[in-house]
Image (cartoon, rainbow, N blue to C red):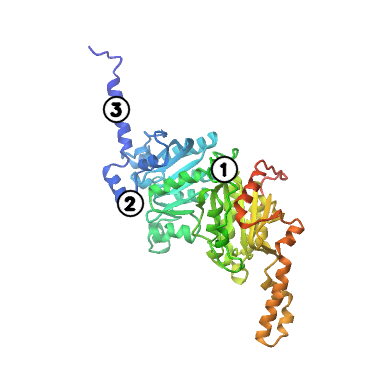
């Protein structure tokens, strides 16, 4: 005779059925549609992102609990949340499920994510969003109760610079789920299937009459090549999640730790004679600075950040002697001869702030003719954008190593971490020219009247060259070294070793700034 006081069977069966139903997400038909769209399900994505069997889910049995939606079931309220591990280190994750009401942001789901944000701050672990969401659930938020919404963005700002934040764009995201990446540290996008915009195409059509696709309005090409909002364009969900893992490998768990150092078989004093063939001695000849970076870092491995935006400046994460470093380098082949414009200044400032926030040393590779000048860039606000880069580099307190390859003129020298900007170790190649401007520009100013007095065009050109060479003789790197304005002049083949020397002697750097609530940043 069954014991009526211990009837666990039906209860356990009911629990198992509820969990099984939740794990089915939006159901077989919507899962199949997700695959037809070229996307993976939220749970497959989590398997690819996290170490095997490390995910501890929070809120699996959540539902919408919204009387206005009736008795329809929304598995996990459209977002899977929990804590897992990447390379053995804990991370908090919020992954929107497009098979459940287009991954829209419901009240219960957002409560779950708020719990993850709080957990990330308490435990000091990275926060990762996997974004595939139509944005706010209009059916639930169209009324004036909206007055209480929006805490997620304020909380993201509070997290900024405390723990790493990653927003992986895996689908079309609008409004609320477009601001999440705007406030995150790292934003990879999947080509062809992801987008972000403040208003989805239906809202845009209704508001401004513009008939445009999600891809045209805010696809990966737009945000990695034009707007600069995103950091990388990748080919698939799997590639996107792989790059998230790679990105986090450079970062500490929080701002109170140092970045993780890896064992490295690449000798720190390895010579780099290949640089002789990569970099021309002629100061105006273009070359690809990315080849220089690959030559000097561990095993030639670099995670480029915003490689398709503001190509005249190259930024990336790499390692030297196993130590993570942030690379900031002018790229003459990327446009403008490597000169700095509005976008390059913004790109550099944000990257410097990111590295400085998480104790990642910075390596600056100079080959810069200065800032772009002219009425067009003045109207774009080149002064305030340049000031933003100046602010970021000045404010950074991590170890800062500078190598001047060929030229570093004017304010370009300052913002690329010249001596006065607390460069902890600054060296130059024999080709280095450090001056307020290049010889050609200086001739046109200093000898303007002399040249104007010469009537013959050929004679004027010849005299201009002579005068330029006279000026060039005064911007020799040995003059700067003679005044101890450079710590050394090095053989290009010793560049990797020089960078390591700088890093090795500044690992315990401490900088005390005057107390302030915060600076007033140029925007």
* Distance between mark 1 and mark 3 Cα atoms: 41 Å
Disc 3 crowd, CA 10 A, few/some/many (<14, 14-19, 20+): few
Sooner in the amino-acid sequence: mark 2 or mark 1: 2
- Residue at 62 percent across and 57 percent down: it is 492
**Vertical side of 310 occupied by 109: above or below:** above
Q: Mark 1 points at which residue?
A: 158
Q: In this view, does 158 lie to the left or right of 51?
A: right
Front residue of this view, candidates 352 and 103 = 352
Q: Mark 2 points at which residue?
A: 38
Disc 2 crowd, CA 10 A, few/some/many (<14, 14-19, 20+): few
Q: Do the residues labelled 2 and 1 touch (CB within 8 Å)?
A: no
Residue at the right extreme, as displayed: 483
* Distance between mark 2 and mark 3 Cα atoms: 34 Å
**Vertical side of 334 occupied by 447: above or below:** below
Residue 332 placement (x, y as % from top left): 56, 64
Q: Is residue 33 left or right of residue 440?
A: left
Q: In this view, does 368 lie to the left or right of 67?
A: right
Sooner in the amino-acid sequence: mark 1 or mark 3: 3
Q: Mark 3 points at which residue?
A: 14
Q: In which quarter of the image is the C terminus?
A: bottom right
- The secondary element bearing badge 1 is classed as helix
- The secondary element bearing badge 3 is classed as helix
């Amino acid at each position: 005779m069954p014991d009526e006081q211990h009837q666990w069977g039906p209860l356990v069966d009911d629990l198992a059925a509820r969990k099984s139903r939740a794990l089915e997400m939006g159901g077989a038909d919507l899962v199949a549609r997700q695959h037809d769209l070229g996307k993976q399900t939220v749970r497959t994505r989590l398997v690819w992102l996290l170490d095997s069997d490390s995910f501890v889910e929070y809120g699996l049995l959540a539902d919408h609990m919204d009387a206005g939606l009736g008795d329809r079931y929304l598995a996990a309220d459209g977002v899977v949340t929990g804590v897992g591990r990447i390379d053995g280190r804990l991370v908090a994750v919020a992954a929107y499920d497009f098979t459940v009401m287009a991954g829209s942001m419901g009240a219960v789901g957002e409560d779950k994510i708020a719990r993850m944000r709080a957990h990330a701050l308490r435990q000091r672990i990275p926060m990762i969003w996997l974004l595939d969401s139509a944005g706010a659930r209009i059916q639930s938020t169209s009324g004036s109760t909206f007055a209480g919404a929006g805490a997620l963005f304020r909380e993201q700002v509070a997290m900024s610079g405390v723990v790493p934040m990653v927003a992986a764009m895996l689908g079309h995201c609008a409004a609320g789920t477009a601001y999440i990446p705007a406030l995150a540290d790292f934003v990879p996008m999947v080509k062809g299937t992801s987008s972000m915009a403040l208003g989805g195409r239906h809202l845009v059509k209704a508001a401004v009459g513009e008939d445009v696709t999600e891809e045209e309005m805010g696809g990966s090409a737009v945000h990695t090549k034009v707007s600069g909002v995103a950091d990388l364009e990748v080919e698939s969900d799997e590639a996107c999640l792989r790059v998230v893992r790679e990105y986090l490998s450079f970062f500490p768990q929080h701002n109170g730790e140092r970045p993780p150092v890896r064992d490295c078989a690449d000798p720190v004093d390895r010579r780099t004679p290949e640089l002789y063939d990569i970099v021309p001695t002629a100061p105006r000849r273009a070359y690809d600075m990315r080849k220089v970076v690959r030559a000097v870092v561990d095993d030639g491995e670099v995670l480029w950040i915003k490689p398709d935006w503001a190509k005249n400046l190259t930024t990336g994460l790499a390692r030297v002697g196993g130590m993570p470093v942030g690379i900031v380098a002018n790229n003459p082949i990327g446009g403008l001869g490597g000169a700095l414009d509005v976008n390059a200044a913004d790109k550099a400032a944000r990257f410097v702030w990111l590295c400085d926030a998480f104790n990642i040393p910075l390596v600056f590779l100079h080959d810069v003719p200065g800032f772009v000048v002219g009425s067009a860039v003045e109207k774009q606000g080149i002064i305030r954008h340049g000031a933003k880069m100046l602010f970021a580099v000045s404010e950074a307190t991590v170890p800062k190593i500078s190598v001047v390859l060929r030229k570093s003129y004017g304010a370009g020298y300052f913002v690329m971490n010249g001596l006065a900007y607390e460069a902890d170790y600054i060296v130059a190649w024999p080709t280095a020219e450090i001056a307020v401007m290049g010889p050609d520009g200086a001739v046109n100013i200093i000898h303007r009247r002399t040249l104007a007095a010469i009537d013959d065009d050929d004679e004027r050109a010849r005299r201009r060259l002579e005068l330029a060479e006279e000026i060039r003789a005064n911007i020799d790197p040995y003059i700067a070294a003679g005044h101890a304005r450079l710590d050394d002049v090095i053989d290009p083949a010793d560049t990797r070793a020089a960078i390591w020397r700088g890093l090795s002697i500044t690992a315990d750097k401490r900088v005390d700034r005057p107390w302030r609530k915060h600076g007033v940043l140029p925007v």
